Amino acid sequence: MTARPLKTVPRVPSGDIHRLSPLDVIKAQIAEDGSDDGGVLFRDMGRKISQCAGDEIGRDTKRCPLRRPLYRDLNGDEKDELLVGIEDSNFLIVRAFTIKDEVVTQIMDAFAQPLSVELTGRDVIVREPTTTAGYDLRTVYSWDRRRQAMERRNMEFVPQPSGTPSSSGASPSAAPRKGPPDEDPAARHL
């Protein structure tokens, strides 16, 4: 992805992304994208988000599809970025935003059917089921200085944690299982 400034969000002279409402940022991003123009799935998501109230975030994702936002320095500038998960049917849209030159800028846009999404250090790690028995797909997104965005750095098949059911042949409506605990005590889950 290419970093993309959001033109309709007010400038943030302090550079503190915590001062912004995550809901307002997502609403602005969707409006600027023309409701994501990605078909019925995204139009329905945009409609649900437009009806969200700020206090609903992370409570009932069927009513308001935004998960509780996470904050972490993803680009090494010693200021937090905003990471937001948006549930849509059996999928999760993961978006990240930073403030660059006082302007809110989208730096990540990923679409997955995750078992887990983790923030570890400055990486975003998405673990998804596969049709290969005994394995999950692990995708790591990291900061790319040249592109000024979070880019897919690594994608690999990893063994499922022992004692977990195989995701082989699992339907998309199957209840997600938790991914393995991360060894990084500072890891956070979206």
Image (tube, rainbow, N blue to C red):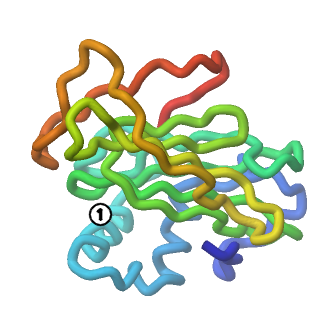
Q: Is residue 37 above or below residue 116?
A: below
Disc 1 packing (10 Å; few <14; some 14–19; many ≥20): some
**Residue 148, percent across and down?**
77, 67
Instruction: Tell me the amino acid under the disc marked 1.
Output: Lys
Locate residue 14: give its quadrant. Answer: bottom right
**Residue 65, percent across and down?**
33, 52
Quadrant of the drawing holding the N terminus: bottom right
Q: Is residue 56 left or right of residue 124?
A: left
Q: Is residue 101 above or below residue 142?
A: below
The answer to which of 45 and 9 lies nearer the viewer is 45
Q: Residue at (33%, 80%) from the top-left corner?
A: 38
Q: Residue at (59%, 40%) from the top-left corner?
A: 70
Q: Is residue 47 above or below residue 129?
A: below
Q: For numbered disc 1, what is the local secondary structure?
A: helix
Q: Is residue 126 left or right of residue 22?
A: left
Q: Is residue 76 left or right of residue 185?
A: right
**Residue 55, percent across and down?**
45, 43
Asked if residue 19 can be seen in this view, the reply is: no
Q: Residue at (48%, 80%) from the top-left corner?
A: 31
**Residue 107, percent across and down?**
66, 64
The residue at which mark 1 appears reads as 48
Locate residue 153: give its quadrant. Answer: bottom right
**How many numbered callouts?**
1
Q: Is residue 119 left or right of residue 172?
A: right
The answer to which of 171 and 80 lies nearer the viewer is 171
Name the outermost residue toward the top. 163
Asked if residue 167 can be seen in this view, the reply is: yes
Locate residue 4: give its quadrant. Answer: bottom right
Q: Residue at (70%, 69%) from the top-left corner?
A: 105
